[in-house]
């Protein structure tokens, strides 16, 4: 029995340093694994910060491009024929060139107004026997159709839409 116990004690005493080395190695591996995880988390944060910086630079550059495009668009819209660099040097040609769009706009407005006046007159005193006369208020309501709303919206949108869209872009750019 003592022989068996001494054999077992001898075996354990020789194996004890190896067992302790295994525990120590296991602790070292756990420590190295924790350091690697910390390093990976640091690298991920570092890449995230760099990506955010890159995204911020891209957003800033995109905003600069949009501002440049808006400026060019405004300059193109405000650069009328016969003004500034587009002048020919012949006074009456420059005046005519600069007045084509306004004259055309006014001519169509006058035509539209005359047609609506004629319609109003026909609604108040119809010439056809099966059409009854209307009151002034009824005629006004009958004259204001969906097509008139579309024309009115298009005109207002054309003249004021560019400024509104530019202010909306500036507002959204200020938020970001």
Image: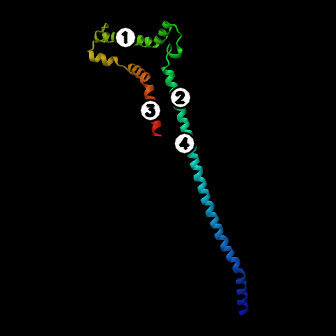
Q: Residues within 10 Å of mark 1 (few under 14, many from 20)?
A: few
CA–CA distance in space, label 2 to label 1: 41 Å
Rate crowding at label 2 as few (under 14), some (14 to 19) or many (20 or more) other CA atoms within 10 Å: few
First-in-chain label (3 vs 1): 1
Q: Which residue is mark 2?
A: 69
Tell me the CA gap for discs 1 and 4: 56 Å
The quadrant in which the N terminus is found is bottom right
Q: Secondary structure at mark 2?
A: helix
Name the spot of residue 152 as percent of width and height, x first: 39, 20
Residue 33: percent from left, percent from top: 63, 63
**What residue would you read off at disc 3?**
168
Q: Which numbered disc, 2 or 4, marks the residue that appears first in the sequence?
A: 4
What is the spatial separation of the Cα atoms under label 2 and label 3, in whole angstroms? 15 Å
Is residue 52 among what the camera can see? yes
Residue at (57, 49) in percent of width and height: 48
Residue matched to label 4 = 56
Specify which label sits upstream in the sequence, 1 or 4.
4
Q: Residues within 10 Å of mark 3 (few under 14, many from 20)?
A: few
Q: Nearer the viewer, mark 1 or mark 4?
A: 4
Taking depth in this image into account, of 122 and 73 the one nearest to the observer is: 73
- Return the residue nearer the eye: 173 or 122: 173
Q: Is residue 159 above or below residue 119?
A: below
Residue located 57% across and 39% down the image: 58
Residue depicted at x 51% and y 25%: 73
- Quarter of the image for residue 42 reads bottom right
**Where does the image place residue 15, in percent across and percent down from the top left?**
71, 80
Dot placed on the residue nearer the N-terminal end, 3 or 4 = 4
Residue underneath mark 1: 115
Q: Secondary structure at mark 1?
A: helix
Between 45 and 144, the one nearer to me in the picture: 45
């Amino acid at each position: 029995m003592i022989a068996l116990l001494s054999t077992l004690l001898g075996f354990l005493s020789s194996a004890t340093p190896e067992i302790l080395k295994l525990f120590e190695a296991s602790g070292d591996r756990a420590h190295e694994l924790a350091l690697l995880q910390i390093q990976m988390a640091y690298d991920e944060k570092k890449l995230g910060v760099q990506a955010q910086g890159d995204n911020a630079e891209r957003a800033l550059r995109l905003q600069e491009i949009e501002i440049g495009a808006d400026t060019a668009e405004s300059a193109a819209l405000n650069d009328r024929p016969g003004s500034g660099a587009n002048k020919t040097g012949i006074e009456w040609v420059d005046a005519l060139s600069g007045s084509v769009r306004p004259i055309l706009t006014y001519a169509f407005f006058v035509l539209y107004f005359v047609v609506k006046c004629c319609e109003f007159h026909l609604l108040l005193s119809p010439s056809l026997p099966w059409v009854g006369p209307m009151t002034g208020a009824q005629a006004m309501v009958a004259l204001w159709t969906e097509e008139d709303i579309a024309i009115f919206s298009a005109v207002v949108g054309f003249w004021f839409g560019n400024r509104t869209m530019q202010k909306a872009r500036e507002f959204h750019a200020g938020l970001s």
